[in-house]
Amino acid sequence: MSAHPRTLFEKIWDDHVIHTQDDGTSLIYIDRHLVHEVTSPQAFEGLRLAGRKVHRPEATLAVADHNVPTTDRSQGIKEEDSRVQVETLQKNCEEFGVRLFGMNDRRQGIVHIIGPEQGFTQPGMTIVCGDSHTSTHGAFGALAFGIGTSEVEHVLATQTLIQKPAKTMRITVEGALPPGVTAKDMALTIIGTIGTAGGTGYVLEYAGEAVRALSMEGRMTLCNMSIEGGARAGLVAPDETTFAYIKGRPMAPKGENWDKALAYWRTLPSDEGAAYDKEITIQAADIAPTVTWGTSPQDIAPITGKVPAPSDFDDPDRQKAVQRALDYMDLTPGTPLEDVTIDKVFIGSCTNARIEDLREVAKVAKGHKVAKNVQAMVVPGSGLVKQQAEEEGIADILIEAGFDWREPGCSMCLAMNADKLEPGERCASTSNRNFEGRQGRGGRTHLLSPAMAAAAAITGKLTDVRTL
Amino acid sequence: MQPFTKLTAVAAPLPMVNIDTDVIIPKQFLRTIKRTGLGKSAFYDIRYHDDGSERENFVLNKPAYRNAEILVTGDNFGCGSSREHAPWALLDFGIRCIIAPSFADIFFNNSFKNGILPIVIEDKNTHKELVDWLEAHEGEKLSVDLEAQVITWGNHSTSFDIDPFRKHCLLNGLDDIGLTLEKTAHIRDFEAKDHEKRPWV
């Protein structure tokens, strides 16, 4: 036992420090590295130019997700630059001996969906990826964070990173979530509470009854959006829910190693009395189905609320930002959110494209039809999620209701492939960012939960799923 | 990496808050396998009209700021994605130093890896004074001295904090990977011990 009670973050950190300089700058070991086609080509090129190898190829897993088409793939990728990027990943993986799930592998999918799905993501690990939503993997009690391409190269070459320990913030959600309220609403409410930069410099640890009650899918949604609150990483302490999810997955520990891993994982949760640099408490009963009205994920309101006015905010910089957001979103202060009509619905992304999310959508959509004014697409998070949804009859329900059932990938979350909003189009989206232009130049995004997205698809406007 | 020591250059004021990486470099420019050539696309959506012509009122399109090497901006600059294309685009435009009340973590970190100095001026009044001065003195230069940790504009100056290790790397243009590879024996040693403790990893 250590002399002082430690947080989950401190335990993981302590077990990964290789070397610490006098100023606290540390070299930490990285257990798992996920690689995708957009942020890796320049890193592999750097290795090649310096004559360096990948230090530990077996700790690395690659997949193409950002650029892949979500329609029929038999003809390959039409856009030349996207195709070159995906082919470059394939060549680099072959040259450097890195495992790759190719575009036609049924395990292909969004990098943050396939890591957990394969059992590649495990508690107590350090996990990085050249993608800010790497925070997703924190749902397993792993220290997981996004890095830039220079650091991707650093990890490939050395299996380490140069870091300073982060500050810790515990966010406790007390009580049980009301009916119709999901992990996505919890995530948006937390960001609205701490602000989009509130978590800068911190690792968030989500705790409390409402968090403990979440499935792994829900915990992944919650941790995924930590970066939208400025925190590079979010954590949930591993427990029986975590272990049950991992057991038996292809890359999970087996046999004697499973027992050893389990014993170690049980030591990870924060000790009683461990100190955090900051504590926030939220009552689950206060969380409503939530939507965003602006161009920052902090711009949230309950679906029963109204579009705010700049004068509702104190800070002059914030007032300017709100005015700009309202202009961009073409919204008038005082408009009830339920009166906002939409053109498109996007159900997908590393935030909300897991099987549980699709089940929620199907539950709401069953027996209904997508509104005439709406085009609604569902993009499963991986080939395996897609297959499972088809086996469970979810796909049939959604197709019957008029949803467009597509192939897995990042798709219209960031609109790098052909899936995007046209200027002025308004979208109810289960993704994670409502920035200007995020889903297509001039496109307008309202973030919400999968159930709320399904409700919006059916009515053609933002809708309180509880009243449907 | 090009060392950063002293810089006296035109500073462009762009005092918006929460400028995210999608604004700094939109997604359609991420389909590249190179680090270079992104400068012309930096701030694309707020810099150009739909037809590709320049928006006259965007600061970097104004004649006085076309050669700006310093950007003075608002809170939480660089929030959003981890794309290093954001600092690459700024560097390719010619930006070597960014001054803001706060930065998003990943962008902040990525900047150092590319020889760009991000400076935090936490004091809102000082930051406002700097922005006001720049707006009143279009195209004037300011000076940044990394060794002394001082910014100077007109008759004013302010000091800034920086992590000593990052300062050392920037002043000397050091390559992180080269530094870490010198510790390979430590890494191998860690791996051997860790394998005893966590054989499943």
Image (spheres, grey):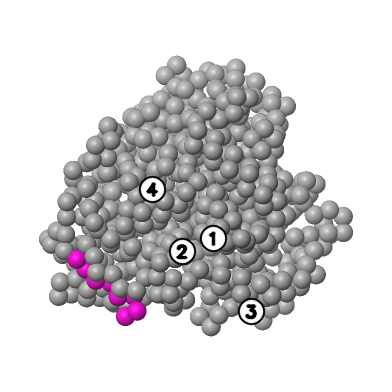
Using the image, name the chain to which the residue with label 2 belongs: B
Query: In what element is the residue under mark 3?
Result: loop
Task: Name the mark nearer the viewer: 2 or 4.
Answer: 4
Residue lying at 82% horizontally and 57% vertically, measured from the top left? A258
Q: In which quarter of the view is residue B154 placed? A: bottom left
Using the image, name the chain to which the residue with label 3 belongs: A
Q: Position of residue A411 (x, y in %)?
A: 52, 35
Q: Position of residue B125 (x, y in %)?
A: 22, 68
Image-based side of B52 in relation to A406, left or right: left
Q: Kindly indicate whether the residue at mark 2 contacts the one at mark 3 (C-beta within 8 angstroms).
A: no
Crowding near the residue tagged with mark 1, few <14, some 14–19, many ≥20 C-alpha atoms within 10 Å: many
Q: Amino acid at mark 1?
A: Glu
Numbered tag placed on residue B113 in the rendering: 2
Q: Where are the magenta residues, as a range? A: B141-148
Image-based side of B83 in relation to A14, left or right: left
Residue lying at 50% horizontally and 68% vertically, measured from the top left? B175
Give me the C-alpha separation between circle 2 and circle 4: 17 Å
Give me the C-alpha separation between circle 1 and circle 2: 8 Å
Numbered tag placed on residue B38 in the rendering: 4
Tell me which label, 1 or 3, sits earlier in the chain: 3
Give me the C-alpha separation between circle 4 and circle 1: 20 Å
Q: Nearer the viewer, residue A306 or B194?
A: B194
Residue holding disc 1:
A151
Q: Nearer the viewer, residue A74 or A363?
A: A74
Q: Kindly indicate whether the residue at mark 2 contacts the one at mark 1 (C-beta within 8 angstroms).
A: yes
